[in-house]
Amino acid sequence: MKSTPHPISLLFLVLLFASLLTLAIAGWQLHTLPSADAYTDKGIYTFIPYEVLPIQVENNTSGRQKRMNPTKTVWQVFYRTVESSGYRWRENVASKRVGQDVIAQKQPVKRRVLSLTGEKSYITVPPELDAESYIDGLRRRYLRILNISAVYPILYLSIRLFLFCRSLRA
């Protein structure tokens, strides 16, 4: 007669799989992270809000909620530079009303523009960050995720090894 695994054992295996998957993704992100030298600092620009629009994004819930609503609406305020550089930036806001309030205030926002050398893409970061500090922050974030993700597999395997050794003695 074949025995079925205990539901708690299955839960532990699912958690093990999830932590290993997170470990792999964070490791890949850390591995493919460009160096700070890959970015060119284009300077600090002043951005002014000019439009609020709804954007459809993938719904990151699960189960029935995801099946019934595969996308959700997120409101974003779009900014452009005061200078004629053509740089744009957008920021998520809680609602259309909040976005309209941001536009009505016309509050300028300073952002640093970093572009990947040899490519036409760019990112904007807070003005106090440069390419080095931005990449260091991402590196610390991915290392933190790696460390947290590594705890469960180590703990799981340690307990399994302990239980196995204990069963050999019995």
Image (cartoon, rainbow, N blue to C red):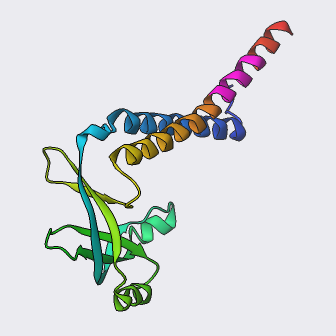
Residue 58 image-quadrant placement: bottom left
- Name which residue lies at 42% across and 90% down: 97
Give the position of the C terminus as an image quadrant: top right
Bounds of the magenta span?
154-162
Give the position of the N terminus as an image quadrant: top right
- Name which residue lies at 51% across and 61% down: 63
Does 8 sit above or below residue 168?
below
Tell me which secondary structure the magenta stretch mostly adopts. Answer: helix
In front of the other: 153 or 46 = 46
Magenta highlight on residue 25: no
Q: Position of residue 106 (x, y in %)?
A: 34, 86
Q: Position of residue 116 (x, y in %)?
A: 21, 47
Residue 26 image-quadrant placement: top left
Seen in the image, is 29 located left or right of residue 82?
A: right
Seen in the image, is 104 located left or right of residue 146?
A: left
In front of the other: 10 or 22 = 22
- Name which residue lies at 70% across and 22% down: 158
Report if residue 35 is visible in the image: yes
Q: Position of residue 24 (x, y in %)?
A: 45, 34
Report if residue 2 is visible in the image: no
Residue 166 image-quadrant placement: top right
Q: Position of residue 143 (x, y in %)?
A: 51, 37
